Image: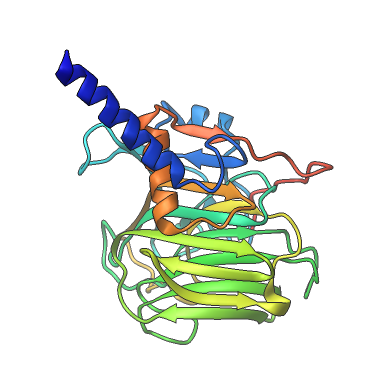
Amino acid sequence: MCAKLFFRVTLLAACASLCSAFAAPPGDGIFFDDFSHASLQALTAQGWTIRHAAGHPGIAGAQWGPNSIALVPDSRQPGNQLLRLRASTDGTPEGTSQAQICQVRKYFEGTYAARIRFSDEPVSGVDGDVVVQSFYLVSPLKHDFDPEFSEVDWEYLPNGGWGDPTTRLYGITWQTVRVDPWQAHNQAHQEFRSVAGWHMLMMQIKDGKTLHWLDGVEVATHGGRNYPVVPMSLNFNLWFSPGGLLPVSKTVRTYEQDVDWVLHVKDQLLTPAQMTSQVQFLRAAGQTSIDTIPLAKPPLKSACDF
């Protein structure tokens, strides 16, 4: 009897400790997904769109959609499931497939975090294509240098690219851009090293500043003209940079990016430890997918094509 009582008291104390770490009550202004869905149909029923539309970014004429998104068992954690993005190419546009998954366009200020596995090499084929692995927020670009364009992102380039062969991770906050010919206005932080493997990436957007965090360490603060001005969609994608493909080959090169979970707490600035505690609490409570972020008023078009 005493042992049972001790266990209950210990459990309640642990729950209280977790709850005290939250800047917002669980379920209040929260989006969370740990990708434990039974199928891709169940995934899309939770507001995710798997991209099929052609267009920027990546290789003109490439496919989006077919076999690019999967839910797979976590080989290192039995019982856990991952979202997997897969992109492949034989060096031709028609032989190239890229991956993108998007949430509804309703996200603005607050804290965002995701646990992501980046990779330096393809799972099949020779290495060397300029591939981009991303976690980001973005609004539509209605025209060149659109003043309402907003984007905050993480982008990993294991094989370099964009005029620099160095392996690096970008943390970027955008003001606006013209795609063709390319001219961008943004602030960028770069980590010049490999980040292959699992990492927690975080973005804080509040009070005119965006902060980028990598594995619990603040690495960049942006703001001023680059601060977002409109609601954005939440996205992951995996794509090839134009001009960065290896020569055409009969052997297909396939790259993968995995996501364990993603969490957003609206209008609150949470620390990395608080975000991790939030995820642990929600999972322990059996909550695998939550969305209490209200739609924009009026609701905004949420095309998954950028």
Which quarter of the figure has residue 24?
A: top right
Q: Residue furthest front?
A: 2
Tally the numbered discs.
0
Q: In the shown orientation, is residue 124 left or right of residue 270?
A: left
What residue is at 43 percent from the left and 61 percent from the top?
A: 201
Coloring scheme used: rainbow
What residue is at 79 percent from the left and 41 percent from the top?
A: 299
What percent of the width, then of the height, locates residue 73?
28, 36
What percent of the width, then of the height, locates residue 267?
64, 52
The answer to whether 44 is drawn above or below residue 199 in the figure is above
Quadrant of the image containing the C terminus: bottom right
Comparing 91 with 242, the one in front is 242
The answer to whether 14 is drawn above or below residue 272 in the figure is above
Which quarter of the figure has residue 223?
A: bottom right
What percent of the width, then of the height, locates residue 222?
60, 76
What residue is at 50 percent from the left and 40 percent from the top?
A: 32
Comparing 97 with 229, the one in front is 229
Q: Residue furthest right?
A: 298
Residue 42 visible in rendering: yes
Residue 70 visible in rendering: no
The answer to whether 19 is drawn above or below residue 166 in the figure is above
Comparing 44 with 4, the one in front is 4
What percent of the width, then of the height, locates residue 63?
53, 52
What residue is at 79 percent from the left and 70 percent from the top?
A: 146
Q: In the shown orientation, is residue 280 left or right of residue 40?
A: left
Quadrant of the image containing the N terminus: top left
